[in-house]
Image (cartoon, helix red, strand yellow):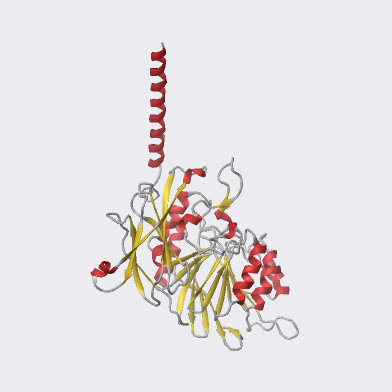
Amino acid sequence: MKADSIKIIFTILLLLCSTTALIAHDNQNQLHHWEKASPDPDRIFLTFYGDPATSRAVTWRTDTSITKSVAQIAKSEASPYFDTKSRTVEAKTETIDLNEAQYNIQGKVNYHSVIFESLEPDTLYIYRVGDGDKIWSEWIQFRTAKTEYAPFNFVYFGDAQTGILSHWSRAIRMAYQKAPDAVFAIHAGDLINTSHKDQEWAEWFKAGSFIHSQWTGVPVLGNHELNALSKNKPEHIISLQWRPQFTLPPEPDLPEVLQENVYSFDYQGLRVIVLNTMQETKAQTKYLKQQLERPGAKWKVITCHYSIFSPAKGRDFPYARKKWKPLIDKYGVDLVLQGHDHTYARGHVPVRTNDDEYGNSDSVETIYVTSVSGHKMYELSTDQLESYSDQGYTPDKTDVQKQFFQVIKVDGNTLTYLAYTADGELYDQATIIKDFESGKKTLK
């Protein structure tokens, strides 16, 4: 009887293991081929880490069979034998279990990251990532920044969030057609809708395809990148995928929760400051002041998710108007790029006069933009926009029910803002002309 019992127990265990394996196999079959991690590198994403003239970071994903990865980099040249001059950099590998979130089924995947250092300024580089043996990505090109002030352009997207593959894909691909030489792309929060949901991240990476690996990305944390893992773990935390898939510079003086989502960089005379509008805003106020008063920037841009002057009905971010706007005014920030409100609104704040009143409409201190690039749309409240007049805000152009992307051009003493609809039509534009000696700016 004892032997028979053991056989029965063993048989039950075998059935359970087989059932578990079948369920896992069925789950994998529910995924599109471009969602599944494999030994081949995918979701390749380029970011700033250190001086844009001498460094870059790259991150990519594989399945867990790839435990050791590398990246190779060389100066690009016309000859196909550039690869013989490449150098190899070992990657840092991190395993995450996607199934910690209740709506994922893929299980564990590996993310790999490399920081390219000691690069030469204003140089076209070519890189690839892989296992160092037989499994490689294609070779991908990017150019390092110049060390001196020089013309360039970049792109900016408001919320992608929903309809990512079906609808947002046309916005990023049209942006690439309009500005193929853009040096970086700002994604102003709510890149996806459900923070930990890997299916949505898969759509975001497929929609951008090779563009994500060629343009240097500037991801901004949105409220939809914060959510609970499950009913049993109700605390809202940053997306499981955020830090593994975006290699972003740390800021040692900031709280842990702000690491790798609050950061800044200087690119050829333009300073970009990335803020987190959902968490530890007080700690960021000191950081913002420090970044704004640092010398060396001819232009200053802030990007964050919540709109400081919210155009959507029922939305509001009073803390930023009370604590951040005085710094924006004092240090002459040129442009604030935002998302969250799923409408289009461009406005500006004029310079204060000697009587501490706001000046005429052709003088400008800061342009504020709220935009949306995905297909989720809200109503716009003109009454709400007009209520900001006591803080100098002047609405310039608004619209609803349109997908947008923006191209910003820096050239000499001008910063030109161009807003395009997702079908490639120029919709709105504004130019700041600045006297760098006096700091005086004119809006055209």
Quadrant hosting residue 376: bottom right
Which of the 4 image quarters holds residue 393?
bottom right
Q: How many marks?
A: 0
Q: Residue at x 43, y 45 (%)?
A: 108
Please give left or right for residue 36 compared with residue 265 in the image. Answer: left
Q: Nearer the viewer, residue 328 or 284?
A: 284
* Residue 347 on image: x %, y %: 62, 74
Q: Nearer the viewer, residue 139 or 4?
A: 4
**Residue drawn at (61%, 88%) of the image:** 438
Question: Is residue 309 in view?
Answer: no
Name the residue at the top extreme.
1
The quadrant holding residue 86 is bottom left
Q: Furthest residue to the right?
A: 355
Residue at 52% in and 57% down: 161
Q: Is residue 64 left or right of residue 276?
A: left
Q: Position of residue 87 (x, y in %)?
A: 32, 66
Q: Nearer the viewer, residue 333 or 200?
A: 333
177 lies left or right of 266:
left
Q: Nearer the viewer, residue 53 or 299?
A: 53
Q: Is residue 133 above or below residue 415?
A: above
| Residue 314 horizontal side relative to residue 70, left or right | right
At a point 31% along the width and 72% down the height, the residue shown is 76
Image quadrant in which the C terminus is located: bottom right
Q: Is residue 353 above or below residue 62?
A: below
Q: Position of residue 1 (x, y in %)?
A: 41, 10
Whole-percent x, y for residue 225 in the image = 55, 55
User: Is there any visible trace of residue 67 in the rendered image?
Assistant: yes
